[in-house]
Amino acid sequence: MKPLQSRLLISFLAITLSMTVMNAIVIRIVATNHFRSFLNGQTRHTEIITMLVRHLTIALSQTLISMAIVIVILTFAISWWLSKRLTYPLRTLIEQAEALAKGHFFHNSNPSNSHNEITYLSSTLNHMSQQLAQQANLRERLIQDISHELRTPLTALKASLAAIIDGVWMPTPERFALLMAEVTRFEKMVLDLERSMIQTQPTMRAKVPVNISNCLHLAIEHVKAIIEEKKIIFHVGILPVDQYVLTDADQLLQVFVNLLDNAYKYTLPHHSIEVKVEVTSRDIKTTIRDTGIGIPMKDLPYICERFYRVESSRDRKTGGTGLGLAIAKEIIIDSNGSLQIESQLGIGTIATVILPKVLSTFVSFS
């Protein structure tokens, strides 16, 4: 028998036995005194009264002892069944927690319909297991994708360099440009992974008032040349003057660059990207809208989770690692804001950053 079940059983028995003994004592005293008072009113013979009271006491004692034995037996049976029923869900939770600690994930396909603390804990543990399993699958897929992305281009780089060394290919600027493009893509993948490792650990960055228009303008300069080269129609609305948010300047710049980077990656030539900023009495809302390929509805709930990638073949083409939006969302939440992603497949995507507005002076970028 398990320790908790034993303690519950002993507790039930102790309570029942204590109540039985107390009731027996009270019944014996009350019944004896009541019977003695009755006899005193019927006869003056002390010996007869004493004898009758003694017989009553013996009869009561035997009856109460018999009742106590029956009550204890019944209590033991009921307590054993009840303690087993109460501890079974806890034992199941312990087994599930031990399985999670060993890396074995589970899914309870038949949840209980009852509403209590144990059921809620079981549901929470089940949800945590599903989330951990999903994260493990996403990490495994990311490792496989990165291995594929690194192995294939590295083989091509090796072959290209060997061809140049052997004199098969001429070392033309075009050849070196192709090699540089592959190296740049590797550099971006490593940078995304480094950012993910940094963001996994809590970072104590000082938050200062940041001019959101200057930050957004700097982010646009990072990607403007690539957008124009791809022949994408790029429209920037009127940016507000002297509007500030409380955050880290470099991290906010990282968020805007990432969102703009995603927009132009998935927008076809001659389609459009629009950037606008709206100021309310409390918030500043920055919207980046594209008319790209969009995101499937089934992927939207997970698009900001770490390592989640929509259609791996498409992301291999664009070189994504499934980290950018996750990092961006963490940065915005850390600044008491929100990041919202809306999308329709074949129509486009809208990324909205909402941050609380503050009043202060301009913060420059280095």
Image (cartoon, helix red, strand yellow):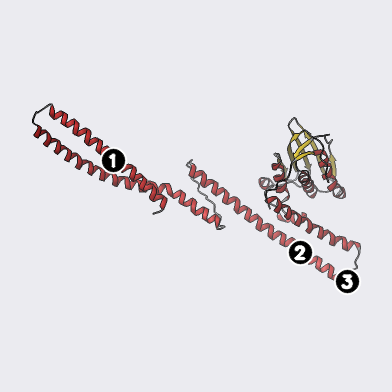
Q: Tell me the residue at 49%/50% (across/down).
A: 93
Residue at mark 1: 20
Query: Which residue bears the numbered disc 3?
Result: 168
Say which element carries label 2.
helix
User: What residue is drawn where x is 41% and y is 52%?
Assistant: 3
Of callouts 3 and 2, which one flags the residue occurring earlier in the amino acid sequence? 2
- Residue 161 in sight: yes
State the residue lying farthest toward the bottom. Answer: 166
Q: Amino acid at mark 2?
A: Thr
Numbered label tally: 3
Q: Residue 141: image x %, image y %? A: 67, 57
Residue sticking out furthest to the front: 46
Tag 2 residue = 152
Secondary element type, mark 3: loop
> Tag 3: residue type?
Val
Above or below for 69 versus 99: above
Specify whether residue 322 is in view. no
Please state which of the two labelled residues, at mark 3 or mark 1, is closer to the viewer.
1
Label 1's element?
A: helix
Which residue is rendered at x = 54% and y = 52% of the image? 107
